[in-house]
Amino acid sequence: MRGVLIAVVVSQVMACQRPSAGSGAEDAAVQDAAVQTDAAVMPDAAVMPDAAVMPDAAVVPDATVTPDAAMATDAAVTPDAAMTPDAAVVPDAAVTPDAAVSGMDAGPPNEVTALGHGARVVSHTLPTQMETGEVVTAAITLENTGTMAWRAVQQYRLGSPMDEDPFVAEGRVDLPVTPVEPGATVTFVFTMVAPVTPGTYQADWRMLREHVEWFGETLAVNVVVTAGACSNPVPPPLNRMNAVIHNDLGWRKVLDSTPIVYGHDYCQEIGFTDDRLFCPPRPEGHPQVDVCNALVVGQALDTGRVGPTWSFNGLPCVDSATDGRCVNHGDNQFLVVVFGPGTARACARNNICRDVVVP
């Protein structure tokens, strides 16, 4: 009985191991699919045809994939060589904010900007000492060291980098000649009026093209202002401007303007004894009239002379603007000559103005 059972078991085992019809093709298909799958997901094997038909090779990682050879990370990617941050990005060279948006000198005097602008200070006559209210004519000579010509129509000017200067109200000086070619020099002449308060002030100037960029060397001079000509007492701030028709010749009229300050005690101290509250900075004929008027009123924006800026019917008093109907007086900025009816206006540097209706 035991022999019969053993024979039956052996028979069943052999039956299980014997392949059925068609099973060999299925096994082969499965094996081929497995090999193809391995080849698809193993890039290194995909480019090695011999390995693709040798399944045993697929399971020998050391033979099929040599990490050090196939992926030589250190050799293929050399961070120091491929990315050298210090060489690729040079902030100081790529971005020079001072030259583009500021009035400060961003580099050597002869440095030329990307737009071809450059300027060098050749000479100047800016004073280092002044008295309060003192009026001085100064000059700055510049050389065009760039590759672009300077033209007035393109708004090339000499300017105060902070858009204001304690000695020149408008902070700009127009080109006296145009164009100024590369290599040529130009001299800017302008009037400086010392502030009313003693102290040390800085006058600084640089070339610019309006709304484009500042460029070239910055000239900066410290000026010590001491109590001087218009002092003892120093006038109060300007309160208003007076303006009247001074000389009426019918078709030609001369207008006169006078600065007025406020202060009962001040007016008495400088010689007005009629108990007035308002008075000019100095009485007519006083030796300090001119310097005190300069201290209170400042300079005209169009001529640079001490006195108000005149306009007529809303246009500056220059021939090209008013067709000759309003002309600044040749000797005195406090006077203006008008022809025909209209409204003249005299404005001090702090935009205190007075209108005169001309019949």
Image (tube, helix red, strand yellow):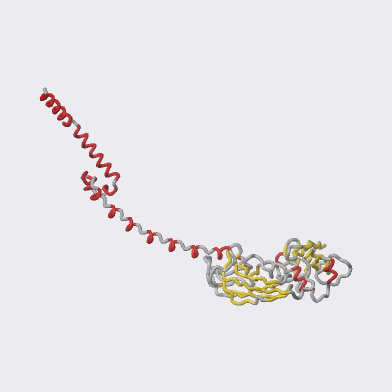
Residue 249 visible? The answer is no
Q: Quadrant of the C terminus?
A: bottom right
Q: Quadrant of residue 302?
A: bottom right
Depth check: give the residue in front, 222 or 149. Answer: 222
Image location of residue 258, percent across then percent down: 80, 68
Image location of residue 153, percent across then percent down: 62, 66
Depth check: give the residue in front, 4 or 295. Answer: 4
The answer to whether 185 is drawn above or below residue 67 in the figure is below
Is 189 left, or right, of 239 in this rendering?
A: left
Q: Quadrant of residue 136?
A: bottom right
In this view, the residue farthest toward the right is: 274
Depth check: give the residue in front, 79 or 100. Answer: 79
The answer to whether 103 is drawn above or below residue 35 in the figure is below
Q: How many marks?
A: 0
Depth check: give the residue in front, 12 or 36. Answer: 12
Residue 261 visible? The answer is yes
Is 41 left, or right, of 120 in this rendering?
A: left
Q: Residue at x 63, y 76 (%)?
A: 124
Is 28 left, or right, of 245 in this rendering?
A: left
Image location of residue 33, percent across then percent down: 25, 39
Q: Residue at x 12, y 26 (%)?
A: 7
In this view, the residue farthest toward the front is: 2
Image location of residue 104, percent across then percent down: 58, 67
Q: Quadrant of the N terminus?
A: top left
